[in-house]
Image (spheres, rainbow, N blue to C red):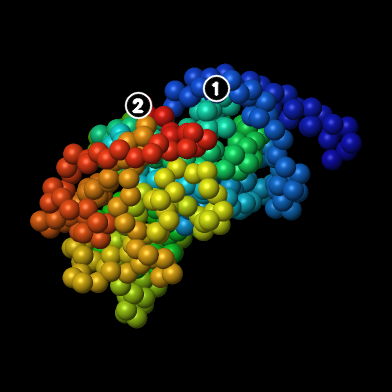
């Protein structure tokens, strides 16, 4: 490329970036969460991508204006940024440890459940919020077509700063400034929508073996197919929803056919090469899972007091929501093939920590002692497992009610420090 051509390309890229920056700013003013910037200037929304990250992109044969794709993993508390390289494949650029996420493993199904969504979501320029009360934020697009088809409620689920979560992916302020800038520049380069793949955990054979009897597994195996397609191609996964389920990598055989999330799927046409690659990967994964099970890997249900955070932040970040909920770490409860706890056997995810106990949900100075629901509450697509007289979560987490979903016990406590704002009540 000649010098004059490079200058022309840079000028065009700058012009595109300016137009998309204006679109982002305008859309952000109307973004969800009903957030107010509290007098903040939105200049932070135009911070440049750090030079070292730009250099990292260049080393991966990509650039700041190339399209991006986001992947998140709740159990590992990690957010990945992928970039389209100059050869047309997505390459992994950087992994960010998540400072805080709330709830349990499993999809979000209702307003107020504190769950971080799982599935495939879309982020557009209008979902970017430069005036967020949480430093910066963008809406992930929950509920999507799948969620709506299942009647799931809630909304305004964000990736934002301040390390405070009530269903959101919460980062540090420095992290969200960097991630926001990367997304902004991708939109500036012409990307119209960013795909976000939100997974309960990395779909490794070990995780699949350990969670094989979890009531959510049917749903997790469904979204794993979409993740597998990305893994084998490094191309953005083609996503559709019909018959109340995800359909990946396929298009209607009749181009004029309508795909409706709640109606039966029309005849779909697969890419045979892609289908073969995914089938091969799934066969290998299944074989590895079977091998681990044969070696004695136990099936478990992981119970969190209220979500978690990446180990990088343990004992280092003090200004976060509900620090007592992550202090003890999660509990691994061995379960049988019906999703029921095995008697007299509890495993702690981190043996150096005490088992996590029921911790209060702080809301405007009032503590709500969380009583975990029965396992069936986490099964969006399969029959409920038998419910014990007392939910087994409650036994391990220290609650005493025999009602799987009682009214919360309200106990006055000292309010959360003012410098860690409680996320606003989410509205649909």
Q: Which residue is mark 2?
A: 428
Q: Do the numbered discs 2 and 1 sit on residues whose CB atoms are within 8 Å? A: no
The residue closer to the viewer here, 285 or 409, is: 409
SS under mark 2: loop
The residue closer to the viewer here, 252 or 51, is: 51
Q: Which residue is mark 1?
A: 38
SS under mark 1: loop
Mark found first going from the N terminus, 2 or 1: 1
The residue closer to the viewer here, 279 or 10, is: 10
In this rendering, is residue 46 above or below 330?
above
Image-quadrant location for residue 49? top right
Q: Position of residue 58 (x, y in %)?
A: 74, 49
In this rendering, is residue 210 above or below 186?
below
In this rendering, is residue 107 above or below 8?
below
Visible in this render: residue 409?
A: yes
Q: Residue at x 52, y 56 (%)?
A: 314
């Amino acid at each position: 490329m000649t010098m004059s051509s490079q200058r022309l390309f840079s000028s065009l890229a700058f012009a595109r970036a300016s137009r998309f920056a204006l679109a982002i700013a305008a859309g952000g003013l109307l973004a969800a969460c009903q957030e107010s910037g509290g007098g903040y200037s939105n200049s932070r929304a135009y911070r440049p991508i750090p030079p070292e990250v730009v250099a990292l992109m260049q080393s991966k044969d990509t650039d700041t204006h190339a399209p991006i794709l986001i992947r998140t993993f709740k159990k590992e508390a990690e957010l990945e940024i992928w970039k389209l390289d100059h050869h047309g494949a997505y390459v992994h650029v950087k992994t960010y440890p998540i400072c805080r996420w709330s709830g349990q493993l499993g999809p979000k199904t209702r307003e107020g459940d504190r769950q971080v969504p799982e599935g495939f979501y879309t982020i557009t320029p209008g979902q970017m919020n430069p005036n967020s009360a949480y430093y910066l934020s963008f809406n992930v697009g929950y509920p999507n077509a799948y969620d709506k088809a299942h009647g799931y409620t809630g909304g305004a689920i964000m990736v934002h700063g301040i390390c405070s979560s009530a269903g959101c992916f919460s980062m540090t302020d420095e992290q969200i400034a960097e991630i926001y800038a990367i997304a902004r520049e991708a939109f500036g380069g012409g990307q119209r929508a960013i795909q976000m793949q939100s997974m309960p955990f990395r779909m490794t054979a070990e995780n699949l073996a350990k969670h094989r009897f979890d009531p959510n597994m049917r749903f997790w195996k469904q979204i794993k197919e979409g993740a597998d397609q990305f893994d084998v191609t490094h191309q953005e996964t083609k996503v559709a929803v019909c018959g109340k389920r995800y359909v990946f990598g396929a298009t209607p055989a009749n181009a004029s056919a309508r795909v409706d999330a709640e109606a039966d799927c029309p005849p779909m046409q697969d890419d045979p090469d892609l289908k073969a690659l995914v089938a091969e990967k799934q066969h290998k994964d299944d074989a590895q899972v079977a091998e681990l099970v044969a070696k004695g890997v136990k099936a478990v249900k992981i119970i969190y007091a209220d979500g978690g955070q990446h180990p990088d932040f343990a004992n280092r970040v003090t200004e976060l929501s509900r620090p007592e909920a992550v202090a003890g770490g999660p509990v691994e409860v061995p379960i049988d093939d019906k999703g029921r706890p095995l008697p007299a056997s509890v495993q702690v995810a981190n043996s150096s920590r005490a088992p996590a106990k029921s911790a209060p949900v702080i809301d405007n100075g009032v503590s709500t002692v969380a009583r975990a629901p029965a396992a069936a509450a986490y099964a969006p697509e399969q029959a409920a497992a038998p419910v014990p007289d007392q939910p087994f979560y409650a036994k391990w987490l220290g609650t005493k009610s025999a009602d799987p979903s009682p009214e919360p016990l309200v106990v006055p406590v000292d309010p959360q420090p003012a410098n860690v704002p409680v996320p606003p009540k989410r509205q649909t």
